[in-house]
């Protein structure tokens, strides 16, 4: 079974590490400096949480689900519906 972990966490430099890890291999990693006064960090958290939930559902349907490249991950992560769900999650926290 594929193991996927998607996180958005504050690091010791007071920035945020976004990571997508598949079977202990980093498929994507980037450090972000969101504008906290605009709640951008909350949107990052909502997006990472939504991505994790969607990845979990993919694995539930197909235990061998995985991305074969960064490009596949990027296409999957750019799903419009996934992003709409993340925005709703963000709005429920902020508003």
Image (spheres, helix red, strand yellow):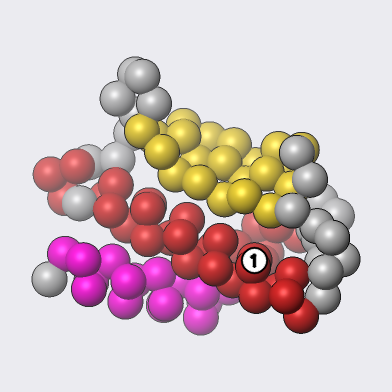
Task: Look at the numbered disc 1 and give the secondary structure of its residue.
Answer: helix
In the displayed structure, would residue 15 be above or below residue 81?
above
Front residue of 22/27: it is 22
The answer to whether residue 79 is magenta is yes
Taking the image as shown, residue 13 lies to the left or right of residue 21, namely: left
- Where is residue 15? Give x, y as percent: 34, 29
Q: Is 9 situated above or below 39?
A: above
Any part of residue 6 in sight: yes
The residue that appears at 12% across and 71% down in the rendered structure is 95
The image quarter containing residue 12 is top left
**Residue 8 percent location from the top left of the image:** 44, 44
Kindly identify which residue carries mark 1: 55
For the question of whether residue 70 can be seen, the reply is no
Q: Which residue lies at the image location 36% right of the left edge and 33% below the top edge?
A: 10
Q: Residues within 10 Å of mark 1 (few under 14, many from 20)?
A: many
| Residue at x-position 31% and y-position 76% | 88
Residue stretch rendered in magenta on the structure: 78-94
């Amino acid at each position: 079974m594929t193991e996927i972990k998607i996180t958005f966490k504050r690091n010791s430099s007071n920035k945020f590490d976004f990571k997508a890890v598949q079977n202990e291999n980093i498929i994507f990693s980037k450090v972000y400096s969101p504008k906290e006064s605009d709640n951008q960090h909350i949107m990052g958290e909502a997006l990472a949480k939504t991505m994790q939930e969607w990845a979990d559902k993919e694995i539930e349907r197909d235990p061998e689900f995985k991305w074969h490249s960064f490009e596949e991950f990027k296409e999957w992560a750019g799903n419009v519906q996934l992003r709409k769900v993340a925005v709703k999650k963000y709005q429920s926290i902020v508003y």
